[in-house]
């Protein structure tokens, strides 16, 4: 092997110089790749551990939801059996099997607290200062939820939205506009101060307005 120190004092052939350069670059690429792979593998292990924890939580949540559903169904079926017994024992005597099932409308329950408020704010904000009625607001929200006209007409959706708008006006968050001559329905618009802050509004009482001060107001439909 030729000592590199000695090579400094002599002229290195171009072919040998190419080999030396190639060897140095290959060694550098190997070191770079090893470090990169080490970092990648460490990050992958962290991500896999996190996914494993999420998987365990998801499995536990699924089991919990299954148990809740089972207990709920058991309770409902017990109530159904008791109701059927009372129907048969009634003096008229009705066969429970001839009664058609009626399913509740899940998309009109608004179990997501604050959903009505957010959609009201969104509709009034998109109106750009123009006043809107509860009927117009209801149409917007029903469209947003994908409700059919029959579902809306058979629900208390418009009543609840009107009461919610009344309560927001009572809180000073939207403005009740003076009715025009011949108008049969109240109109509301978004306050200027609310134009930039409506996304922060989440009201926890959307599904329980019976105790709010606005529910006792004498208002126009």
Image: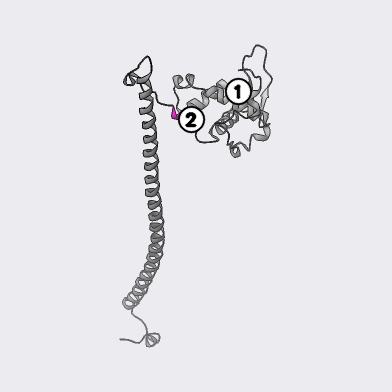
The residue lying at 62 percent from left, 14 percent from top is 184
Quarter of the image for the C terminus: give it: top right
**Considering depth in this image, is 175 or 22 the residue closer to the camera?**
175
Q: Would residue 4 be visible to someone looking at this image?
A: yes
Q: Is the magenta stretch mostly helix, strand or loop?
A: loop
The stretch of residues the image draws in magenta is 103-113
Image spot of residue 187 (x, y percent): 63, 21
- Which of labels 1 and 2 is toward the front? 2
**Considering depth in this image, is 14 or 160 the residue closer to the camera?**
160
Among the 4 quarters of the image, the one containing residue 101: top left
48 to 153, vertically: above or below: below
Left or right: residue 20 compared with residue 214: left
70 to 54, vertically: above or below: above
**Considering depth in this image, is 96 or 154 the residue closer to the camera?**
96
Among the 4 quarters of the image, the one containing residue 97: top left
Left or right: residue 75 compared with residue 131: left
Among the 4 quarters of the image, the one containing residue 50: bottom left
Circle 2 sits in a helix, a strand or a loop, which is it? loop
Assess whether mark 2 and mark 1 are in contact (beta carbons under 8 angstroms). Answer: no
Image spot of residue 142 (x, y percent): 49, 25
Image spot of residue 183 (x, y percent): 64, 14
Quarter of the image for the N terminus: give it: bottom left
Left or right: residue 211 compared with residue 73: right
**Considering depth in this image, is 210 or 131 the residue closer to the camera?**
210
Image spot of residue 117 (x, y percent): 57, 32
Q: How far apart are marks 1 and 2 (CA)?
A: 23 Å
Q: Which mark is residue 173?
A: none
Q: Name the residue under label 1.
A: 132
Q: Name the residue under label 2.
A: 109
| Crowd class of label 2 (few under 14; some 14 to 19; many from 20; radius 10 Å) | few
């Amino acid at each position: 092997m030729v000592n590199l120190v000695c090579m400094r004092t002599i002229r290195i052939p171009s072919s040998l110089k190419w080999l030396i350069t190639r060897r140095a670059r290959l060694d550098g690429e190997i070191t770079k790749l090893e470090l990169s792979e080490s970092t990648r593998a460490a990050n992958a292990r962290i991500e896999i551990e996190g996914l494993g924890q999420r998987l365990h939580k998801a499995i536990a949540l699924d089991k919990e939801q299954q148990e809740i559903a089972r207990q709920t169904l058991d309770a409902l079926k017990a109530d159904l059996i008791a109701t059927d017994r009372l129907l048969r024992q009634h003096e008229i005597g009705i066969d429970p099997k001839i009664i058609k099932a009626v399913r509740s409308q899940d998309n009109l329950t608004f179990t997501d607290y604050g959903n009505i408020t957010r959609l009201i704010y969104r509709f009034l904000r998109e109106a750009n200062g123009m006043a809107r009625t509860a009927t117009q607001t209801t149409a917007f929200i029903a469209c947003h939820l994908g409700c059919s006209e029959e579902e809306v007409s058979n629900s208390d959706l418009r009543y609840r939205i009107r009461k919610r708008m009344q309560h927001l006006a009572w809180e000073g968050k939207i403005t009740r506009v003076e009715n025009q001559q011949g108008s049969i329905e109240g109109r509301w618009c978004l306050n200027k101060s609310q134009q930039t802050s409506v996304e922060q509004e989440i009201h926890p009482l959307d599904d329980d307005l019976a105790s709010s001060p606005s529910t006792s107001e004498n208002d126009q439909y």
